[in-house]
Image (cartoon, rainbow, N blue to C red):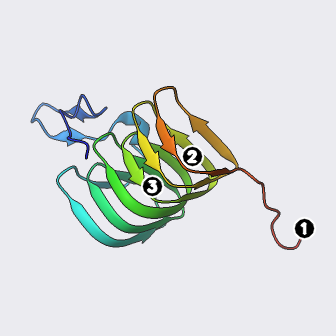
Amino acid sequence: MFVGGSPEARGGLRNMAGIEKVPASRAGAHTVIGSSIVIDGEISGDEDLVIQGTVKGRISLRESLFVESSGVIEADIETANVEVSGQVTGNINASDKVELKADCKVVGDIRAPRILIADGALFKGNVDMEVRETKGK
């Protein structure tokens, strides 16, 4: 399991009061699951989500999921875009793009039309990049 370091080490920022802030690249995300939070169940929603803590179960989002370096997910994921800097164990199904950052660890199958895997990322699973036609075309 990843052990979170300082917010700066995880790509976060602190303000003058020492309160952790989400990185500017995730500033559009409305919901953050903090590093000390553990969720066991299903998460669904229509907005971006940043995970710095632990989630077990299932994640279904209309928008993007960002798994920070301190984030640990043991769940199947279905969303438009996924960016992983932490650990994911489970299958990822994205309608647009999956990006595995350096030093992340993903164990599970990935299904997406676009996949980026950075040097240093660990991935064990299968990849399906087949573009599926929508009904009625």
Dot 3 corresponds to which residue? Answer: 48
Judge left or right: residue 72 versus residue 75: left
Indicate the secondary structure of the residue bearing disc 2. strand
* Residue 101 vertical position relative to residue 34 in the rendered view, above or below: above
Judge left or right: residue 134 versus residue 63: right
| CA gap, disc 2 and disc 1 | 25 Å
Nearer-N-terminus badge (3/1): 3
* Residue 131 vertical position relative to residue 124 in the rendered view, above or below: below
Indicate the secondary structure of the residue bearing disc 3. loop
Category of crowding for the residue at label 3, using alpha-carbon neighbours closer than 10 angstroms: few (below 14), some (14–19), many (at least 20):
many
Q: Amino acid at mark 3?
A: Asp
Judge left or right: residue 12 versus residue 137: left
| Residue found 50% across the figure and 55% down from its top | 108
Q: Please name which of the two marks, 2 or 1, marks the residue nearer to the observer.
A: 2
Q: Please name which of the two marks, 3 or 1, marks the residue nearer to the observer.
A: 1
Dot 1 corresponds to which residue? Answer: 137
Q: Quadrant of the C terminus?
A: bottom right
* Picture coordinates of residue 87, whole percent (x, y): 37, 47
Q: Amino acid at mark 2?
A: Val
Nearer-N-terminus badge (2/3): 3
Dot 2 corresponds to which residue? Answer: 98
Q: Please name which of the two marks, 2 or 3, marks the residue nearer to the observer.
A: 2
| CA gap, disc 2 and disc 3 | 14 Å
Could you tell me if the residues under marks 3 and 1 are in contact, i.e. CB atoms within 8 Å?
no
| Residue found 42% across the figure and 69% down from its top | 58
